[in-house]
Amino acid sequence: MSSPAGGGSGAVPPDVALFVASLLIGGAERTAVVTANGLLAAGLTVDLVVPGGDGGAAGPLAAEIAPGVGLVDLGAPRTAAALPALAAYLRRRRPRVLVSYVTHANLVALAAARLARATPVVVVEVSTLQRIVAQSDLARDRLLPPLVRRLYPSAAAVVANSQGVADDLAVTCPRLAGRIEVLPLPVVQARLWRDAAAEAGDEWFAPGRPPVVVAVARLVPEKDLGILLAAVARLRAAGRDVRLLVVGEGPERSRLEAEAARLGLVLGVDVRFPGADPNPFRFMARAAVVALSSQVEGLPSVLVEALALGVPVVATDCPSGPQELLAGGRFGHLVPVGDPAALAAALEDVLDHAPPPAPREAWARYEAEQATGALHDLLRKVWRDEATSRHSRS
């Protein structure tokens, strides 16, 4: 179990412990790190707790954790296996509140809190669970709805990152209706523009080169990147000189590379898959358009980041997030899910008629300070409610 100064082995209980499945590069993982840093800056004592395994204390996002945030590695190989160690941590450290992110980790956090009988839990849901379960062949995913129905009502507060996620969660667990708080997550940091200003270090973005469509996504089925490949292939078949850069890694890499070849796209010439990158913003800032082709989302942070960078966006109108973020199409193009022709047409429209940058109102609520402040307000309410409950029992 690792713990920098101020962290998991100190005598004074932390105000907040945040539990996230890993410190690998991902939206929820980065959100947890940014939130930990923001709450620390607001004067709270903070532990960031991870199960362990490949995404433990040595994960790439560890470098972004502010000095003073305690990093606790539970030493478990995966999230579910961390349950006993998390319960032991809660009994030993007794944080005033535990905030967890993403369904699997949320369930472990709630079960651990039951075992420890010590800590109120705030769960943050970022996925439309109904759609994910419907599309999954995994037995463990089919277990999620009954577990959510059993454990989520015991949370001190339930947070959704979009109204679509909140609505979906209320269908999964009707007992939560009226209890779900929709709060923005801290996506936009000051470093966004600093990182975006870094040299691209890529000849595709040199002056005079063809326009580049950029996608930043895990290479997994729900991102439906094959549709984006098909859309770009349509543009090239029509004589449009455009390239596609897909920043991200995942199990679909081989299939997507084969699909690109089948569509006539030459790897390294027409399309590239450079893998995950800690600074995709230098590519996004120089893109002709940022594209999102997902079948399902919670609230895609890449769209928020693109809007903040002033880059045009094209996104599928998937559940949920793009409709809310783009204000029904006011701040970017929305196209039907799974429709490469519509996606190609929207990309072509942006390439021919680049829209002005989105106004600040499109992304301001996702600025780190404002979003972290909203969570801090909710934590104050949880603490007040806990104090009232203790007083009534005494």
Image (spheres, rainbow, N blue to C red):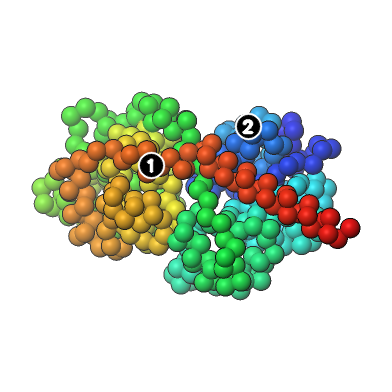
Mark 1 burial class by Cα count in 10 Å: few <14, some 14-19, many 20+: few
- Which residue is at a point 74% across and 33% down the rendered structure image? 6
Quadrant into which the N terminus falls: top right
Q: Residue 100, image x and y in percent?
A: 63, 52
Residue type for callout 1: Glu
Q: Residue 393, image x and y in percent?
A: 86, 60
Of callouts 2 and 1, which one flags the residue occurring earlier in the amino acid sequence?
2
Residue 46 position by quadrant: top right
- Can you name the residue that lies furthest to the right here? 394
Q: Is residue 370 left or right of residue 262?
A: right
293 relative to 365, above or below: below
- Which residue is at a point 11% across and 51% down the rendered structure image? 238
In the foreground, 377 or 70: 377
Which type of secondary structure does the marked residue at label 1 adopt? helix
Residue type for callout 2: Ala
Q: Is residue 243 left or right of residue 91?
A: left
Calculate the distance from the C-alpha at mark 2 to the C-alpha at mark 1: 25 Å
Residue at the spot of label 2: 41
Q: Mark 2 and mark 1 in contact? Answer it, CB < 8 Å.
A: no
384 relative to 5, above or below: below
Residue 324 position by quadrant: bottom left
Q: Is residue 349 left or right of residue 50?
A: left
- Which residue is at a point 44% across and 53% down the rendered structure image? 299
Which type of secondary structure does the marked residue at label 2 adopt? helix
Q: Residue 166, image x and y in percent?
A: 51, 62
Depth-wise, is mark 2 or mark 1 nearer the camera? 1
Q: Residue 277, image x and y in percent?
A: 44, 38
Which label sits on residue 46? none
Residue at the spot of label 1: 361
In the foreground, 321 or 55: 321
